[in-house]
Amino acid sequence: MTRARIVLGLDPGSRRTGFGLLASGPDGIERIASGEVRLDTERAFAERLPELREKLLRLLREHRPHEAAMETCFVARSVRAALVLGHVRGVLLLLCLESGLDVFEYAPAEIKRAVTGNGSASKTQVARMLPRLMIGPPASPTEDEADALAAAYCHLVRPAIARAKPLRGIP
């Protein structure tokens, strides 16, 4: 398959960060790679951030995506959890921008709608739908992996005119 455009989807987490690399081509959308960047939870949180940066940098160098996509930030459990997630997102955003990628953010409902047609779909529904939408997806992606794949998929299927303005890569 000719790979016209490669998008890196990210699902930030302080213990596991999901990633999904998708390519658009004449035959459809192909999964190039996906999984989780697992961090050593025995280490202090601040020590995990450089570990995350290094592991993701290897992924970027290996696959050379053109753009990145992720969910917009939201406060789920607590203010502390939001702050921790903000640190992780900051590392991911900076690394993507330093690597020259434009970063696009989408609301959770927008991502769910792109994958399932329903903006209030459950995580399980999104994960079950993904294998039907692309070439070569894992049969059962993990939750973090599915969230990352869904963000990348949303970005690829959005018409360019309807995309949000990106955070621009640093030249």
Image: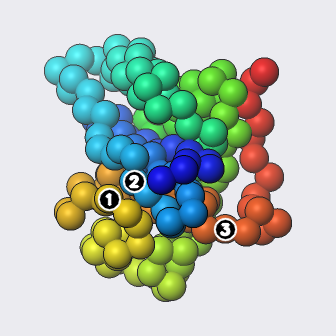
Q: Judge whether 32 appears above or below 137 on screen.
A: above
Name the residue that disc number 2 marks.
Answer: 31
Q: Amino acid at mark 1?
A: Gly
The residue at which mark 1 appears reads as 136
Closer to the chain start, of discs 2 and 1, is 2
Kind of residue at badge 2: Arg
* C-alpha gap between disc 2 and disc 3: 17 Å
Give the residue type at disc 3: Arg
At mark 3, the secondary structure is loop
- Position of 151 relative to 6 (above/below): below
Query: Nearer the N terminus, badge 2 or badge 3?
Result: 2
Q: Please identify the quarter of the rendering in which residue 42 is found.
A: top left
Could you tell me which residue is drawn at 56 percent across and 37 percent down? 65
Q: Which residue position is annotated with label 3?
A: 158
For the residue labelled by badge 2, is the local secondary structure a helix, a strand or a loop? strand
The residue furthest bottom is: 118
Tell me which residue sits at (35%, 44%) in the image.
Answer: 33
Determine whether, in the image, residue 52 is placed left or right of residue 109: left
Q: Residue 143 location in percent, x, y?
A: 28, 58
